[in-house]
Image (spheres, grey):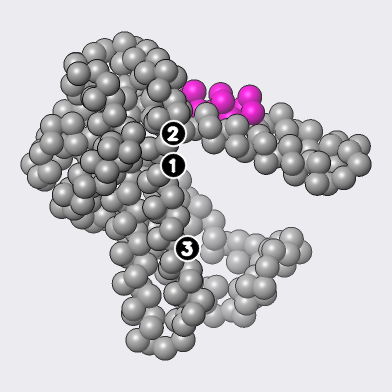
Amino acid sequence: MISTIKTAFITGLKFWKIVLLVYFLQLLVAIPLAMQVWHVLEASIGNSLEINKLLPGYDHTVISDFLKVHGGSITPLIGQLRWALVVWAVASVFINAGVLFTLVKKTPNWLAFWTGGATYFYRFTKISTIFLFILLVWTGITILPYLANLQVNLETMASEKTVLGYLLVLVIVWLAGFVYLFCASVIAKTAIIELGLSTWKALKKGLGFGFRNYFSLAGIFLAFTALQLLALALYWWLEGKSGMVTVGLVVVFFLIQQALVFWRLMGRVMMVGGVSGFYAEKTI
């Protein structure tokens, strides 16, 4: 597993051109919504001091009053967000297909990315929908019953710590299932590219291989998740030390934020490459 993580890390660095392309594609998806948010802030909310009341922390009364005053301005944003989510879902499937194709074929160039995205978009849409459905079922089994009985538990249990303890356990269980489904999804898609399997055969292979090698795959997932969390913690530390108190620091931290986004995308490429590479090693 250690060698797989090392190889995936080096591979991610070599695929920086693919990561850069993904960065700009996601930026293009985000720009329309960001422009709408900017117009709302400039036209209505930005001219009001009500937003300052939200800064200290959560207050249900303040939020309710805020929505009553500026609800008309926020409604268009909700409509834009609905369509943005649809566009994001479509773009996400295409991007994931392109990235995984370049990783499997070991060709870090943009032509391969577009070829992979176009070739496997439809099949990846089907299998992604299936895994999303399974994740929703898993969420319904683990988290929703707890939330449905949360008020009753708070009233009947002796301590709120017990209620929160149960929640923590359930979150850990849910995350364990999420990691399994994520890795199984990558393996199933890799099998489609490498072996040309049908959707259901690839699904079976992904779930089976993921179950048999769960701890190794979870180790790969957690290793690259830890790298991203470390970068985020470093950013928070830098911001806490200086903060965006001058125009120059605003520019500096904006660039750092974009570098953090780029690193997050690279970390995901490393993670996907690690899971896919581990599967390839075990099936040779």
Residue 135 magenta? yes
Evaluate if marks 1 and 3 touch, with contact meaning CB atoms under 8 Å apart: no
Give the quarter of the image for residue 155: top right
Kind of residue sitting beneath label 2: Ala
Q: Position of residue 107 (x, y in %)?
A: 10, 39
In the structure shown, which secondary structural element does the residue marked by tag 3 occupy? Answer: helix
1 or 3: tag closer to the N-terminus: 1
Q: What residue appears at the point 47 percent right and 63 percent down from the top-left corner?
A: 233
The residue wearing badge 1 is 222
Q: Viewed as shown, does residue 252 lie left or right of 161?
A: left
Evaluate if marks 2 and 1 touch, with contact meaning CB atoms under 8 Å apart: yes
Dominant secondary-structure state across the stretch colored magenta: helix
Whether 18 is drawn above or below 151: the answer is below
The residue wearing badge 3 is 233
Viewer-nearest residue: 77 or 245: 245
Question: Does residue 178 show up?
Answer: yes
Magenta residues, as a range?
132-142
Q: Residues within 10 Å of mark 3 (few under 14, many from 20)?
A: few
Using the numbered discs, state the Cα–Cα distance from disc 1 to disc 3 in whole angstroms. 16 Å
The residue wearing badge 2 is 218
In the structure shown, which secondary structural element does the residue marked by tag 2 occupy? Answer: helix
